[in-house]
C-alpha cells in the first residue's frame, strides 16, 4: 500500500473543503478514496494503489472500466449532435429503444430519464394516470417490500422499505405500503422454501384486500432484493405475485436498476421467473454508468390509454437530460459489447464458480449463509449460527477493511434499522477475467481464514 503523497494530501484537503459526499456525515478525520483511473475490473487510487472493484462502483460498471469504444461513441455523438430534448427525437434514442424492445421480447414503449430514481417516479406517475384513464380513478397506492431500495427522490424513497433512509426526511409521499420480503435463510424452522415463499407472496394479497383493492395502483419490486441484502426468492414467489396482480387489476412494476443487463446471469433478472411485468425500470448497467441514463419500459396496452383523443390524456412528465444523445449512443455500444463478449453468459458462469468456491466459507464460525444469482453474491455474517443474530458492525467492517487492504473492494448491505447490516456483497464487473476471479476468491478466503 503506497502512502499518501503531498499531491494527494492537497487534493484530499480540497475535497474536504468543498464536497459533501453521498451518505456521509461531517468528519474531520476520515475521507473517501480518491480514484484516478480504471482498467477492466480494476480501479487505481491517487496514490497508485490498485483494487479489484468487487462492487462495480455502485453495482453499475457491468462492462468494466477503460472501454475506449464507449468513450468514442460519446465523443462521436457529442460532436455530431450534443442535445435534443425528448419532446423531439434523434437516431440514438430511436435505435436504443428498438434494441431494448427486441431484448424484452414484448411490445413495450420506452420512456427516457436520468437515474434509477427518476425511472421509478415515472413508473408511479404512469401507473396512477393509467388507472384514472382506464376508469379506475381510485387506484393510487403502491405496495413494495421492507428492505428494498428504489431510490432517493420522494416517491422512490417512499417505496423504499428501509426505515433509516427515510427517518428525518418524513413526511414522504402518501400511498406507499410495505410487506415483508422472503428471506429464505431466516424462514421459520420446518417450513419449506416453497411454502414460505407462497406465504410471503400472499401478504400482498392480504394487504390489497385490507386496503380495499380499488385503491391499489401497483406493486413494485426487484426480481431479487439487492441492496437490502441479496434476498433471492423461490420462483413461485414472483409467479404468485404476478397472479395476485392480474387478479386484482394491480400493475406489476419490476425494478431492474441493478438486476438488468446481465447482472443475474440473464439479460434481465425477471427472466429467471415465468412473469411478464407491466412496467420495467432500468438504469446503471444500461450504460455501465459511463453516462447517466435510465429507462421506464411500459407495455403498449398501457401506453394506448395515454394516446386517445381525450383532452388531458397525455403524460405530463418531462425532464431535460433524459435520452441524451451521447448517453443513448453509449448505451447502444454498451449493449453491443455485452453481446459481442457474451457477458450475460459470462456472468452466469463466473457467478456459479464464485458461489461454489465461496460456499465453503459456510464452515466459518461467523458465516451464516452464502447465496447468489449470476455475478451477484451475498455472504451473511452472524454472531451465532444457532440464533442467527446478525454480526456486529465491527466484525463486518473488519472483513471489508481487510479485503481492501489486500486489494479487493467489497460491499456491505442489508437494512440498518432492523440490525441487518451484516451482508457482504459482491457485484463485480461482468468482464472479469479468470485471473480476476481467482484473485477475488483467494483474497476473500484468506481474509476469512485470518478472521477465524
Ligand atoms: N432501484 C434500485 C434497485 C437501486 O439499487 C437504485 C440505486 N442503487 C435505484 C433504484 C435508484 O437509482 P439512482 O441512484 O440512479 O437514482
Image (cartoon, helix red, strand yellow):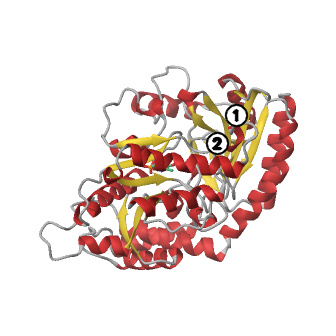
Q: Residue at x 49, y 42 (%)?
A: 179
In the current view of this chain or complex, which residue is farthest to the top? Answer: 28
Which residue is rendered at x = 84% and y = 40% of the image?
361
Residue assigned mark 1: 400
Q: x%, y% of residue 267?
A: 60, 68
Q: Nearer the viewer, residue 405 or 367?
A: 367
> Which residue is painted at 56% across and 24% down in the image?
30
Q: Position of residue 415 (x, y in %)?
A: 56, 34
Q: CA distance from mark 1 to mark 2?
A: 23 Å
Label 2 SS: loop
Q: Quadrant of the N terminus?
A: top right
Image coordinates for residue 165, horizontal then vertical, percent: 45, 33
343 up-or-down from 172: above or below: below
Question: Is the C-beta of the residue carrying label 1 under 8 Å from the nearest atom of ligand 1?
Answer: no
Q: Examine the image and state in which quarter residue 5 appears.
A: top right
Tag on residue 1?
A: none
| Residue bearing the label numbered 2 | 183
Relative horizontal placement of residue 134, taking residue 334 as reference (left or right): left
Q: Earlier in the sequence, mark 1 or mark 2?
A: 2
Q: Is residue 18 above or below residue 258?
A: above
Quadrant of residue 422 in the image? Answer: top right
Q: Residues within 10 Å of mark 2 (few under 14, many from 20)?
A: some
Does the numbered disc 2 mark a residue whose Cβ is under 8 Å from ligand 1?
A: no
How many C-alpha atoms fall within 10 Å of the one at disc 1: few (<14), some, or many (≥20)? many
Q: Nearer the viewer, mark 1 or mark 2?
A: 2
Q: Nearer the viewer, residue 158 or 16?
A: 158
Q: Position of residue 258 (x, y in %)?
A: 55, 54
Q: In this image, 249 relative to 392: left or right?
A: left
On the question of residue 151 being in view, the answer is no
Amino acid at each position: 500500500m503506497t502512502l499518501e503523497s503531498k499531491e494527494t494530501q492537497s487534493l484530499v484537503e480540497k475535497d474536504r473543503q468543498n464536497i459533501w459526499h453521498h451518505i456521509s456525515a461531517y468528519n474531520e478525520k476520515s475521507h473517501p478514496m480518491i480514484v484516478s483511473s480504471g482498467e477492466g475490473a480494476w480501479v487505481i487510487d491517487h496514490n497508485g494503489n490498485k483494487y479489484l472493484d468487487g462492487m462495480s462502483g455502485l453495482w453499475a460498471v457491468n462492462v468494466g472500466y477503460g472501454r475506449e469504444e464507449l468513450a468514442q461513441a460519446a465523443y462521436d455523438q457529442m460532436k455530431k449532435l450534443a442535445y435534443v430534448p425528448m419532446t423531439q427525437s434523434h437516431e440514438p434514442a430511436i435505435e436504443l429503444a428498438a434494441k431494448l424492445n427486441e431484448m424484452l421480447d414484448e411490445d413495450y414503449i420506452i420512456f427516457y430519464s436520468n437515474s434509477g430514481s427518476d425511472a421509478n417516479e415515472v413508473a408511479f406517475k404512469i401507473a396512477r394516470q393509467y388507472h384514472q384513464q382506464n376508469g379506475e380513478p381510485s387506484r393510487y397506492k403502491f405496495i413494495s417490500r421492507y428492505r428494498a431500495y428504489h431510490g432517493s427522490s420522494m416517491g422512490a424513497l417512499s417505496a423504499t422499505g428501509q426505515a433509516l433512509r427515510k427517518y428525518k426526511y418524513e413526511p414522504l409521499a402518501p400511498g406507499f405500503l410495505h410487506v415483508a420480503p422472503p428471506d429464505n435463510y431466516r424462514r421459520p424452522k420446518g417450513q419449506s422454501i416453497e411454502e414460505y415463499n407462497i406465504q410471503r407472496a400472499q401478504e400482498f394479497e392480504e394487504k390489497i384486500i385490507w386496503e380495499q383493492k380499488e385503491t391499489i395502483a401497483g406493486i413494485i419490486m426487484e426480481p431479487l432484493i439487492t441492496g437490502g441484502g441479496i434476498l433471492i426468492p423461490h420462483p413461485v414467489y414472483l409467479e404468485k405475485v404476478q397472479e395476485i396482480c392480474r387478479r386484482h387489476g394491480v400493475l406489476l412494476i419490476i425494478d431492474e436498476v441493478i438486476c438488468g443487463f446481465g447482472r443475474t446471469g440473464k439479460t434481465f433478472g425477471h427472466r429467471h421467473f415465468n412473469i411478464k411485468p407491466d412496467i420495467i425500470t432500468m438504469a446503471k448497467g444500461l450504460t455501465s454508468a459511463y453516462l447517466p441514463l435510465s429507462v421506464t419500459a411500459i407495455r403498449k396496452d398501457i401506453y394506448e390509454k395515454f394516446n386517445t383523443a381525450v383532452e388531458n390524456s397525455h403524460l405530463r412528465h418531462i425532464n431535460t437530460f433524459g435520452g441524451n444523445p451521447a448517453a443513448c449512443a453509449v448505451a447502444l455500444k454498451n449493449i453491443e459489447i455485452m453481446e459481442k463478449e457474451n457477458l450475460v453468459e459470462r456472468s452466469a458462469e463466473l457467478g456459479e464458480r464464485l458461489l461454489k468456491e465461496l460456499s465453503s466459507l459456510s464452515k466459518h464460525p461467523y458465516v451464516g449463509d452464502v447465496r447468489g444469482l449470476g455475478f451477484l453474491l451475498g455472504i451473511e455474517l452472524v454472531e451465532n449460527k444457532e440464533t442467527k443474530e446478525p454480526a456486529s458492525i465491527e466484525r463486518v467492517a473488519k472483513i471489508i477493511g481487510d479485503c481492501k487492504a489486500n486489494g479487493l473492494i467489497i460491499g456491505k448491505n442489508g437494512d440498518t434499522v432492523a440490525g441487518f447490516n451484516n451482508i457482504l456483497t459482491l457485484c463485480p464487473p461482468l468482464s472479469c477475467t479468470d485471473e480476476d476471479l481467482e484473485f477475488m476468491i483467494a483474497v476473500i478466503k484468506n481474509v476469512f481464514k485470518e478472521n477465524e
